[in-house]
Image (cartoon, grey):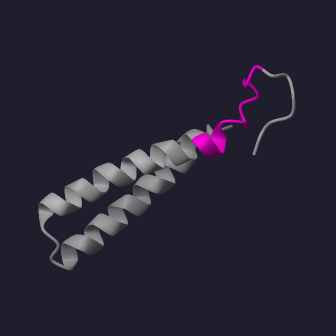
Amino acid sequence: MPSWFNVYLIGFIILIIGLALGAHLLGVPSTWIVVGVICLIGIGILSAVKKTQGRSGSSGTGGPPRY
């Protein structure tokens, strides 16, 4: 079974690549594309951790997973 964190993160990276390519085609300066990609990667990691936090069952509380 694949790690849901990895699946979520790969999907987010594909989205970032598409947005960066679109920005490049629109003529956005490379500096701002890099800044946007770095910010979106950080948001993607935070979102992936939040989404998959309760699914692993290792929360330590013994209770049901939080969603």
Does the image show residue 15? yes
Residue 42: where, in percent of width, then height?
Answer: 39, 45
Name, please, the residue furthest toward the top.
60
Left or right, 67 with reference to 31: right
Give the residue at x 13% y 62%.
Answer: 30
Give the residue at x 53% y 41%.
Answer: 6
Check if residue 56 falls in the magenta segment. yes
Left or right, 55 with reference to 47: right
Residue 53: where, in percent of width, then height?
Answer: 66, 36
Does the image show residue 2? no
* Residue range corresponding to the magenta coloring: 50-60
Number of disc labels: 0
Work out which quarter of the rendered image holds the N terminus and state it: top right
Is the residue 37 above or below the residue 54 in the image?
below
Q: Mainly helix, strand or loop, the magenta region?
A: loop
Residue 61: where, in percent of width, then height?
Answer: 80, 22
Give the residue at x 65% y 40%.
Answer: 52
Looking at the rendering, which quadrant does residue 21 occupy? Answer: bottom left
Is the residue 35 above or below the residue 4 in the image?
below
